[in-house]
Image (cartoon, rainbow, N blue to C red):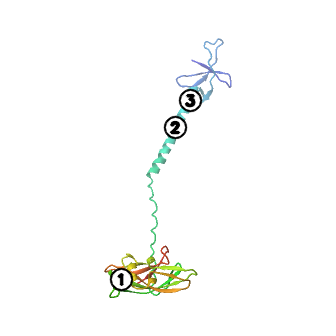
Amino acid sequence: MEIYTDPSTGRPYVVDPRTGRSRWFDLPASPAVARTQELPVVPDGRGGSRARPDGVSVIVKLLGALVIVSVFGTALTLVVSRSRAEPTRPPAAAPTPTRTTPPRPPALGTPVRDGKFEFIVHGTRTTKTLGNAVLHTTAHGAFVLVSVRVRNISDEHQNFLSLAQKLHDEKGNEYGTDVRATLYLGHLRNLYDDVGPGRTVDGTLVFDLPAGARPARIELHDSLLSGGTDVMLT
């Protein structure tokens, strides 16, 4: 049996190792046992007091730490499980772009402009041959002749080039002017003309379309590199 001393009263006490309960102990005049180190006395909840060794305090702290770690781990598991269980929302679909129909080009007789020129297409006609009885040429399909009036709307000279003009058929095929066939018209201005400021010239553009192809529109340019403007032929 070990004897302890209450630090607050200085009275000795003993602790029952089986129950952990403590009781006051009056030492005899000649103590037969030696005193041990002083330990604090804590109430046992039943009117007595008991000593709590330092080892018990360490165990209690370890148990508390384990409980905290266990609760934190359980909460983290619930959060992860909930995030996995929530369905992923699909991304919002991109809006479908609205398709707009381009405006129809102007009709025959309507003035149109590109760069320094204003054009008026008077009409078209077709023929199989060009020239005369002595000198003539025959189309692979049919010659389409387009009558055009050109006016220089700038204050500078500008060259009209038949090679810069394009014709499109109803299937979207593009054709350039037939230079060789144009020569049989007898006027070089149909191929090239220097148009002064404010001046107006009339000419004819010649295209050789294959059999069965029907002209739809003509694309007119004031130069080889200009943006161009369209006129409907039908």
Q: Secondary structure at mark 3?
A: helix
- The residue pinned by badge 1 equals 143
| Residue visible at 48% across and 43% down in the picture | 74
Q: Quadrant of residue 154?
A: bottom right
Q: Amino acid under label 2?
A: Val
Q: Amino acid under label 1?
A: Phe
Please provide percent x and percent y for residue 136.
34, 84
Q: The C terminus appears in which quarter of the rendering?
A: bottom left
- The residue pinned by badge 3 equals 58
- Disc 2: CA contacts within 10 A as few (<14), some (14-19) or many (>=20): few
**Would you say 133 lies left or right of 51 here?**
left
Please provide percent x and percent y for residue 93.
45, 63
Q: Identify the residue at the far front of this view.
A: 134
Alpha carbon of mark 2 to alpha carbon of mark 3: how far? 14 Å
Q: Quadrant of residue 138?
A: bottom left
Alpha carbon of mark 1 to alpha carbon of mark 3: how far? 110 Å
Q: Which mark is residue 67?
A: 2
Q: Amino acid under label 3?
A: Val
Q: Secondary structure at mark 2?
A: helix
Please provide percent x and percent y for residue 206.
39, 82
Q: The N terminus appears in which quarter of the rendering?
A: top right
118 or 10, nearer to the observer:
118
| Residue visible at 44% across and 77% down in the picture | 163
30 or 96, nearer to the observer:
96
Asked if 80 appears above or below 227 in the picture, the reply is above
Asked if 43 appears above or below 211 in the picture, the reply is above
